[in-house]
Amino acid sequence: MASNIINAIHTTSQQVDEEDHYLHAYGAMITLIHLRQLTPITTPPHQYRRILFGILHAEMPEDVWFAEQDLDNLKRDPEGNARDITLLSNEIEDIWEEDREGGVREVKVREEGKVQPCYFVGQIMTHSRYGYTGLILGWDTYCKADESWIIRMGVDRLKHGRLQPFYKVLSVSPNGERSQRYVAEENIIVSSGSVGSYFSGDPAPFLRVKSLGKWFDRWDGGMFVPNGEVREEYVDDWKG
C-alpha cells in the first residue's frame, strides 16, 4: 500500500494540492522505513528514496532520525545501494549542519596565557590513529561534547584528555560520503598541502563538496581561506 501511495505522486490529478502530495509521500516513506525492518521486499526504489528524503530535508528536518534509521538499514543490507548510502549520509549531514548553524556563533580568540590550539581553520589534517583525511572547520579550546559522547569515545583515556583543544573536521571518503568529526588535538597531523595521494593533503576531495562555500572562499596553495563569516568567528586564524 505504501508503495502505491508513492507511485501516486506521478499519477494524481493536478487539482490536488502539491503540499498534499508531499505529505502523502512523506507518510509513505515513514511507513516503508518501518516495514523494511520486517522484510527487505518493501525497500523503495532508489529514485523515490532520494525524492522523499529531499522532502524531509526541506520540510521536516526535525524528523532526521527517520533518515538515520533508514541509513543504518541500508548499511546493514548486503544489497544496499552504495550511491543511496552516500547521498543519504550527505543529506543527514546537511540537516545537522544547518541545525548547528542556527545557534548563536561564539567568537573564538587565541588568548595569551591560555590554552591555544596549534592548528587553524582551513588546514588539511590526517588522523594519526585512523588515517582519514579531514579539513579543519573550527575548534574549541577544550572538549565541549556532552558527557555521554566523552565516555563513549574514551576521551579521558587520551594522553591529554578532555582539556586539550578539539577540532571540528570535515572528512570526505573516496566515494564522496561526507561526515563531520570532533577530533582531539593529539590525534591530528597537519598535512603539507601537496597535491597527490588522497592522504597527502590533496584539496581535491574537498573542492568537490558543493557546500564548501559555507566555510571557505578558495584554496590558496597550502590551506583553504575562510569566508567572511568564519573569519568573524575565528578572528585570529586568518590575518590575510
Image: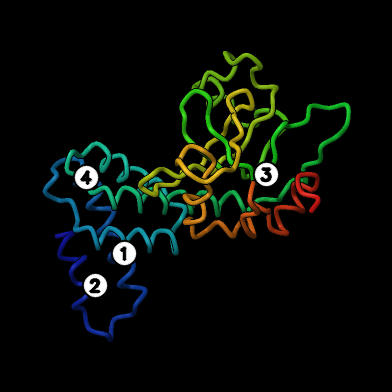
Residue 234 location in percent, x, y? 75, 46
Residue type at numbered disc 2? Ile
Q: Pick whichever, 238 or 180, lies toward us.
A: 238
**Disc number placed over residue 193 in the picture, else none:** none
* Disc with the residue nearer the chain's start (4 vs 3): 4
Closer to the chain start, of discs 4 and 1, is 1
Indicate which disc, 1 or 3, sits on the residue closer to the N terminus: 1
The reply to whether callout 2 and callout 3 are in contact (CB within 8 Å) is: no
Q: CA distance from mark 2 to mark 3?
A: 44 Å
Q: Position of residue 135 (x, y in %)?
A: 57, 43
Q: Is residue 172 above or below residue 152?
A: below
Query: In terms of image quadrants, where is residue 72?
Result: top left
| Tally of numbered tags | 4
Q: Nearer the viewer, mark 4 or mark 2?
A: 4
In which image quadrant can residue 194 be found?
Answer: top right
Disc 4 or disc 1, which is closer to the eye? 4
Residue at screen point 46% across, 55% down: 61
Task: Identify residue for label 4.
Answer: 80
Specify few, some or many for label 1: CA neighbours under 10 Å numbering under 14, 14-19, or 20 or more.
some
Q: Identify the residue shown where x is 69% and y is 29%.
A: 165
Q: CA distance from mark 1 to mark 2?
A: 11 Å
Disc number at residue 9? 2
Question: Mark 1 touching mark 2, by CB under 8 A?
Answer: yes
Q: CA distance from mark 4 to mark 1?
A: 17 Å
Q: Residue furthest left?
A: 41
Residue hosting label 3: 121
Disc 4 residue type (three-letter): Gly
